[in-house]
Every structure is written in structure tokens, then in C-alpha cells.
Amino acid sequence: MRMGGRWRFIDTGSSDGFFNMALDETLLAGYESGLMPPVFRLYGWNPPAISLGKFQPAAGVVNLADCRADGIPVVKRITGGGAIFHDEEITYSFVCSDRLAGAVSVKESYKKIGAFLIAAYGEMGIDVSFAGETNDVVKSDFCFGGREFYDILTDRRKIGGNAQKRKRGVIFQHGSIPLRLNMGRIKKYFKNDITAGYPAVSLGELQPRLSAGKIKKILKESFLKSQGVEFTESRVSDSEMETAKKNARIKKKCFYTGEAS
Amino acid sequence: MEIFYTKEHDWVKVEGGIGAVGISNYAVKQLGNITSVELPDVGSEVKQNGVLCTVESEKAASDVYAPLSGKVAEVNKELENSPGIINSSPEGLGWIARIEISNPDETGNLMDEEKYGEYLKTLE
């Protein structure tokens, strides 16, 4: 079953990590309130940032002092999963009802919704499969060092990370599609050796000629086709922007004075 | 002891003004392996249908809702190190919190075992 229906499509470009996570939370709250239609968002990160899964303690996973000194924001996601260093990457997020997704169970939803990523990678000429189908399930603090059942692999290497938040019949999911990965440069920000996990791969290594603009277009069209939805080109409303900016300020203050939120 | 369920698949077993709360067999099947539980704070006040805590399973963080209003009197500390107890015994040893119920009449908004069984059939 495909999702169908009319969705908002928003490309918010690159922003800092505090705003990116605050806006995802705002979009989820808007849909949960019943006032907003489902939404699909594309975005990027500037400056680079680290996001942690909701259940990861910041001080136990990252070297906060180094991150603060180098201006690398550390933010908590509302979703599960492991830490991600966001630099040159394209990130997507969406929010809809579990009924609309045609999948109430978590595994089923990753499979059904993951179809858009499988189709997108196929369009880019990359063969991918779900980790669970090749028995490659591994746990790790670092998202790209571990793999869960419906993580997407190419040649047994993880090519992106996805995570969900579930609230009262609502599915929120976001995912990271790295264009470049430089584990050697970012490992100093993590307490554990992130190069020790299973290998990951970026899109840039596999398809260096694909521009970010082209990749975004493929992701958008793959979501539209594989899920059978219609998009209305949209923008962040004034009230959404106000809420997201306010919450981003709280997250920033928390990072510089406490841990991460 | 009576057991009641919510449409969000949370349960509460009521006995002597205390309600033990957890998530149902159905919820566990939908979530998959539970890997972490963020327990509520003892002493915190919860409202009926408000967020009680969050559980993580297979990269999904899912909210658990309070079936009844009240004050959190006790939490199941065993879940901190062994969240999988929720998978093996969701409606028994996998209880999450015990709540001092502030308004027993709120059970009128919940489903008993028979009604919950009928509700599950509508989801098939």
C-alpha cells in the first residue's frame, strides 16, 4: 500500500543543528495537532553538527569540550538510534499518520517507507539492500558503525541512517544521506573509536559526479512516485519559524551551558 | 484487580488506589525489540493521556501515555538494565510505573479486556 494524499514539500536549505532539530520538532507538533497536512522536508547542515539519539547521554558519547571549542553543535534528536556527524550531507524528514503509511509496526514502516530510498539509490545507479536481508545487524554508538534490520547497505556498507519517533498514531522519520564521510577528521569528537565499527560509504564515493541539487531532485521524485503522494511546494510558516527559532535558542543555550537537548 | 487499556495500547492494572502501568502485547509486537526505556521521575504528576515516558525499539523512540492521572509512586528499575523484560512479559513483569491514582472515575474512559479485544479486531 502506498501513502497517497497531498503533502507539503519544504526545502529549508542549510541551517545550524539547533534550528534543524527544532524545526523537525515543530513540524511534528503541527501535524500532531491536526492543523497541518503531512510534510516532507529536505535540509542541510551549516556549520557541521553532531546529533545524538534520544537515549544517548551526550557526555558518554561525545567530547563536549572539543565540540564547543571547534563550534560543532551537539543536539539531541527526538528519534532513536546512534550518533551522526552531519557535514556534507542531505537530510530528509517527514511526518504522517501510521495509517497513511499503511504500516503500524516499526519494522513494516521502515520497509514500506524505505522503498523511496531504495528507488532513489536505484535511480542514482547504486545497488542497495536492507541489512536484515543479508544478516548484517550490528549495534554501535555511532550510527554509521552499526546496522539495524532495515538500514540500507550497498556492498555490505551502510549508505545512510534513518530513525523514527512515534506519537499517538503519528510517524516522524528523518534520515541522513552523507555526500562525504571523513572518519579520520571527526573521530576526535567521539569517546569511542568510530573507525572500529563496520564500514560506511558516502554517495560522493560512489557517484562523485552527482550534484547535491540532482540528488535532492531524485529524492523528491522517488518519494512522490514510490509513495504515490502529491506535493504542494511550501515554505516554513511565520509561526512555525518563530517556534522553531525559540526552541533552537533553548537547545543552543543547553549545549553551551549543560549537555545537549 | 482490574485491567484497563487505552487506544494507544497502554494498560493499567488497578488495585487499592494504585495503578500499575505498561504497554500491551499488541504494542510490543508493533515496536519490536525494546532497547531502552526512559523511566518517568518518581513523584512526577501525570495526566490521563499525557506522555508518561518513552521507549526505544529498533531506532524508533515511541511515547507511552498515562492511562490515568496521578502521581508516579514507583518505577520498574529492572527495565534500566533489562528493557527486554517488556518484550518477554509486557503485561506482567514488564510494568513501567505504579501511579497513585488521583481520579478513579477516569477508568470510565478506558476499555476493559473484552472491549480492548474487540478494538484490536478492528485494527486487523
Image (cartoon, coloured by chain):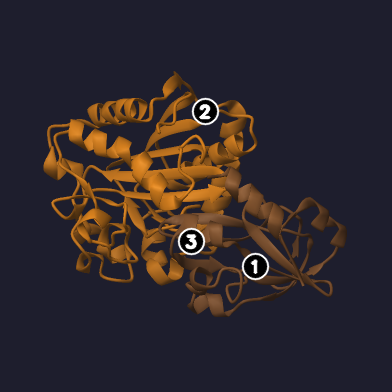
Chain colours: A orange, B brown
Mark 1 and mark 2 in contact (Cβ < 8 Å)? no
Marks 3, 2 in one chain: no
Circle on res. B67: none
The quarter of the displayed image where residue B1 is located: bottom right
Circle on res. A236: 2
Q: Chain of mark 2?
A: A
Residue that mark 3 sits on = B56
Q: In terms of sequence position, does the residue under pointer 1 or pointer 3 come before the other?
A: 1
Compared with residue A87, is residue A149 higher up or lower down, i.e. above or below?
below
Indicate the position of residue A58 as horizontal and vertical percent values. 45, 65
Q: Residue at x 59, y 77 (%)?
A: B93
Q: Quadrant of the N terminus of chain A?
A: top left
The quarter of the displayed image where residue B54 is located: bottom right
Compared with residue B47, is residue A3 higher up or lower down, i.e. above or below?
above
- The answer to whether one can see residue B104 in this image is yes
Q: Residue at x 52, y 28 (%)?
A: A236
Indicate the position of residue A68 as horizontal and vertical percent values. 41, 59
Say which element carries label 3. strand
Per the model, the C-alpha gap separating discs 3 and 2 is: 29 Å
Say which element carries label 2. loop
Compared with residue A187, is residue A228 higher up or lower down, i.e. above or below?
above
**Label 2 Cα neighbours within 10 Å, binned few <14 / some 14-19 / many ≥20:** some
Q: Chain of mark 1?
A: B
Compared with residue B73, is residue A87 higher up or lower down, i.e. above or below?
above
Residue that mark 1 sits on = B40
Quick one: A6 or A23, which is closer to the camera?
A: A6
Mark 2 against mark 1, which lies toward the viewer? 1
**Label 3 Cα neighbours within 10 Å, binned few <14 / some 14-19 / many ≥20:** many
Q: Amino acid at mark 1?
A: Pro
Quick one: B68 or A160, which is closer to the camera?
A: B68
Say which element carries label 1. loop
Q: Amino acid at mark 2?
A: Val
